[in-house]
Amino acid sequence: RKEVEQDPGPFNVPEGATVAFNCTYSNSASQSFFWYRQDCRKEPKLLMSVYSSGNEDGRFTAQLNRASQYISLLIRDSKLSDSATYLCVVSHGSGNTGKLIFGQGTTLQVKP
Amino acid sequence: SQTIHQWPATLVQPVGSPLSLECTVEGTSNPNLYWYRQAAGRGLQLLFYSVGIGQISSEVPQNLSASRPQDRQFILSSKKLLLSDSGFYLCAWSVSRGYSYEQYFGPGTRLTVT
């Protein structure tokens, strides 16, 4: 079993739609959580950190459920430019190494 | 502000040839540094990480090695490339924000071994 699991998709949605991605992680010792975005043939970029109380950044809302070991990302009012692969990422907080564990990613395609 | 550089952007090398990829970070000191590989259509695989000069940890046994000769320089090398070394190589640095480390990636090197 992968340590971080995501539905690979693709999710095909029309512009303006709301779409939600889910992610589960297996290590209950995980301490930090992130969503990264990766455009085709580009490097991953940090989209947002995920906090225990949930957090929002514009059209993006991230939520964490530690009891269920589940992370979600909600995108409202989808834009064509949101088309990308979204990576769910966790960290065990293992000392000072800062090592991250990446999910395989969920692909989003926003259509006009 | 911090920036991370990687070069070259693309590279085509024959099997059995050596490899040297360089990564440098500006605007920060004593960062943690990482090398990842992403094979076509696959996820990110952590290859090496470094928490300081001369300190290298390897995550998977393979045909590659890493070195950190200076605080903000991280080098990925191979003496003899294999076909399976093809992929997208990404360097990243991280900074501690309390207990959380956010990682920031360079633009990557796309390596094709022929």
Image: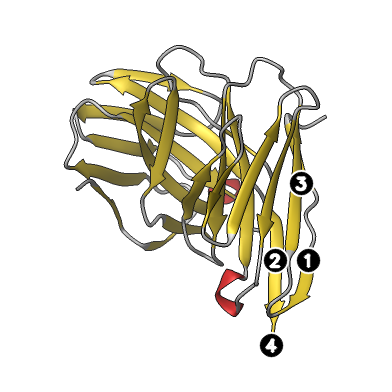
> Mark 2 packing: few (<14 Cα in 10 Å), some, or many (20+)?
many
Q: Do labels 1 and 2 share a chain?
A: yes
Q: Where is residue A58 in the image (x, y as percent from the top left)?
A: 52, 60
Q: Of marks 1 and 3, which one's residue comes earlier in the chain? A: 1
Question: Gap between marks 1 and 3, in whole Å?
Answer: 12 Å
Question: Gap between marks 1 and 2, in whole Å?
Answer: 5 Å
Q: Which amino acid does label 4 sit on?
A: Pro
Q: Disc 4 is attached to a residue of which chain?
A: A
Q: Can residue B58 be seen in this view?
A: yes
Considering only vertical position in the picture, is B7 above or below A4? below
Q: Where is residue B75 in the image (x, y as percent from the top left)?
A: 30, 37
User: Which residue is labeled 1 in the image?
Assistant: A11
Q: Which amino acid does label 2 sit on?
A: Leu
Numbered disc in front, either 4 or 1: 4
Considering only vertical position in the picture, is B47 above or below A88? above
Q: Is residue B41 visible?
A: no
**What numbered label is drawn on residue A112?**
4
Q: What element carries label 1?
A: strand
